[in-house]
Image (cartoon, helix red, strand yellow):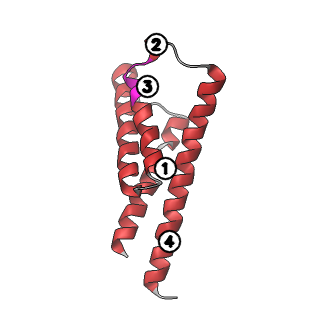
Amino acid sequence: MSTAVSKSMAARVVKWAACLLGTAVVLMFVVFAIGEGPPPWAAMNASFAAVGVMLVGYLVMWWKDWLGGVIGLAGLGWFQAIEIAANGHPAGGIFALLIIPGVLGLLAGIMRRLT
């Protein structure tokens, strides 16, 4: 197997990992939204919009891995900036792990361009 083929295969594996993890994140938020019911209109603030941008980015990764990664990370960064401004620290827990699909999407795009 040539190195170009192995690099191409690695880029595809990273892309699939990013897309599947991103879709799992989106589905997790959908399940919580269905279980808890729609949020009240008063709760539809900038944090809600930032998470929405992140989720859209993670779905865009299925078509454009690097663009979806950028959009997803921008939404997550926006959300964390709001959290830091409001609470003095970034959101932890599961929100700390939400960076993984975006980083993998960017990495897949970079790997694809280098092969």
Question: Disc 2 to disc 1, how far (Cα)?
Answer: 30 Å
Residue 100 badge: 1
Q: Earlier in the sequence, mark 4 or mark 2?
A: 4
Query: Are circles 4 and 3 on residues that touch, CB within 8 Å?
Result: no
Q: Is residue 27 above or below residue 66?
A: above
Tag 2 residue: 41
- Real-space Cα separation, disc 3 to disc 1, in angstroms: 20 Å
- Residue furthest out toward the bottom: 1
Is 3 in front, or is 42? 42
Front label number (3 vs 1): 3
Which label sits on residue 10?
Answer: 4
Q: Which mark is residue 7?
A: none
Residue at 45 percent across and 76 percent down: it is 7
> What's the magenta region?
44-49
Separation of marks 4 and 1 at Cα, in angstroms: 17 Å
Label 3 vs 2, first from the N-terminus: 2
Q: Residues within 10 Å of mark 1 (few under 14, many from 20)?
A: some
Dot 3: element: helix
Q: Mark 4 or 2, which is nearer the eye?
A: 2
- Residue position for label 3: 48
Circles 3 and 1: CB atoms closer than 8 Å: no
Query: Helix or strand or loop: what does disc 2 sit on?
Result: helix
- Residue at image x 39%, y 19%? 45
- Mark 4 or 3 closer to N-term? 4
The amino acid marked with disc number 1 is: Ile
At label 3, the amino acid type is Phe
